Amino acid sequence: MFAILPGGGRLAYDVAGHGPPLLLLRPLGGSRVSWDSFATRLAMHAQVIVFDPRGVGDSSAAPLACSTRGMARDALALLDHLRLARAHVYGISLGGMVASWLAVDAPTRVDRLVLASTLPRGLEAHAPGGALGIWALLRCLARPAAEAEACLATHILSPQFRACQPEAVRRIQQLARQKPASHRAFLSLAGAAARHDIRGQLGAVRAETLVLIGEYDPLLTVDSQRQLLGGLPSAHYELVTGAGHDVSVEAPNVTASRVLAHIL
């Protein structure tokens, strides 16, 4: 199904399950099919809405001047299209940045909020993990589009997960290859993440917020999470043990259970 955006373009989306509406916002890399078992688990108790951001999967091309705030406006347009006055929102990594702006700019539309592996400010080359993330992105972009998606999806997994779950890693790579984004779209979305800075606006978030962090996440620092938690008026923190940056992939059942406990 498609939602037509007010300023042009379209978003490809799917809805599954019954219960309170829950909008999922993707990280960089992978289309809506990459939610896989995480979305399936959530759909047992909620109406789960997944979509491809512009530039990804079946959606239209990403604008050149892509921003996390602009992506939040697209997400809001999807809620309008679905005639949803309010929805719970889960965002991870880039999706968490987008979810943060959605909660700031449309506070009456966001019920409860989950920010997983989310930075209040985009990655910088000199920050811990920043150079690692930028180098990995460039290395992945040297490959053809489908392999670039699989490369990025693999890189953000923790070494522990890659060593212990080879079959799951192959499944993640297979899903990432299904609808690869172009290199141009990758760069546009990565640029949006790099420019993201919501530190001065976090106090405007009114939603009760759950902050999830993977135990082995190489990109988040203690400082960044202090800024995030300190700026949110109503938030609590939970650690997902044994998981890296993408907690919804490395620990789908545990993460889904945490999300459902927060929204139900």
Image: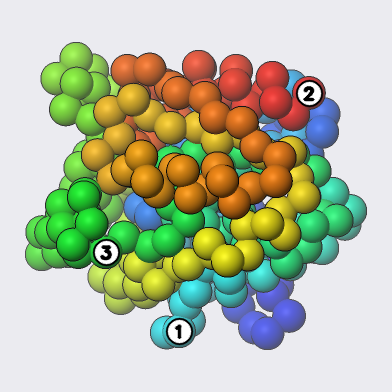
Percent x, y of residue 91: 55, 46
Return the residue at label 3.
124
Return the residue at label 2.
264
Q: Residues within 10 Å of mark 2 (few under 14, many from 20)?
A: few
Q: Which mark is residue 65?
A: 1
Q: Left or right: 17 with respect to 131?
A: right
Q: Left or right: 167 with respect to 194?
A: left
SS assignment at label 1: loop
Q: Measure the C-alpha gap from mark 1 to mark 3.
A: 19 Å
Residue depicted at 19% across the width and 21% down the height = 160
Q: Measure the C-alpha gap from mark 3 to mark 2.
A: 36 Å
Q: Looking at the picture, which amino acid does disc 2 mark?
A: Leu
Q: Left or right: 196 with respect to 211?
A: left
Q: Quadrant of residue 141?
A: bottom left
| Nearer to me, 251 or 178 | 251
| Nearer to me, 201 or 82 | 201
Q: Earlier in the sequence, mark 3 or mark 2?
A: 3
Q: Looking at the picture, which amino acid does disc 3 mark?
A: Glu
